[in-house]
Image (tube, rainbow, N blue to C red):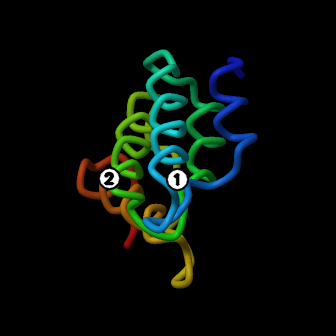
Amino acid sequence: MRAEVRAFVADGPLPDVGASGEEIDRRVEQLDAIPRPVTAEEARALADSFGPDDCHGVAWTLLHLIETGPNPVLTVKPEPDANEWHDRLWMRALNAGLVEGG
């Protein structure tokens, strides 16, 4: 796993919308530093970095970064109490015909 991905993952999940502008900017800079495309291993690690909400749109950037890697990242439907972003990754893979089930 590349250093940029390790650094992002090591900082934990994205903060919520109540985080400071500086914290959100820092996390955006970390995401921007990750070369595209990501590997399958990196995509799986990044998928655990979603926070409780969209973090002022940063979660969408993370989702799109994950999707630069080999898809699908999730191969089984998330549990009903899963993070909403895991549900989004699953539904996007399902709609693209990358996974079966529902």
Q: Position of residue 31 (x, y in %)?
A: 49, 31
- Residue displayed at 48% across by 47% down: 24
Give the quadrant of residue 62.
top left
- Residue displayed at 64% across by 28% down: 5
Instruction: Specify the amino acid type for callout 2.
Output: Gly
* Label 2 crowd (10 A; few <14 / some 14-19 / many >=20): few
Disc on res. 35: none
Depth check, front residue: 30 or 64 = 30
Where is 13 relative to 77, above or below? Answer: above
| Foreground label between 2 and 1 | 2
The residue pinned by badge 2 equals 57
Depth check, front residue: 45 or 78 = 45
Q: Position of residue 76 (x, y in %)?
A: 54, 62
Q: In this view, does 99 lie to the left or right of 43?
A: left
Where, quadrant-wise, is the N terminus in this rendering?
Answer: top right
Measured Cα–Cα span from mark 2 to mark 1: 21 Å
* Circle count: 2
Give the quadrant of residue 44.
top right
Where is 67 relative to 52, above or below? Answer: above
Give the quadrant of residue 51.
bottom right
Query: What SS does tag 2 mark?
Result: helix
- Residue displayed at 34% across by 57% down: 56
Disc on res. 74: 1
Q: Position of residue 85 (x, y in %)?
A: 44, 62
* Label 1 crowd (10 A; few <14 / some 14-19 / many >=20): some
Query: What SS does tag 1 mark?
Result: loop
- Residue displayed at 54% across by 30% down: 30
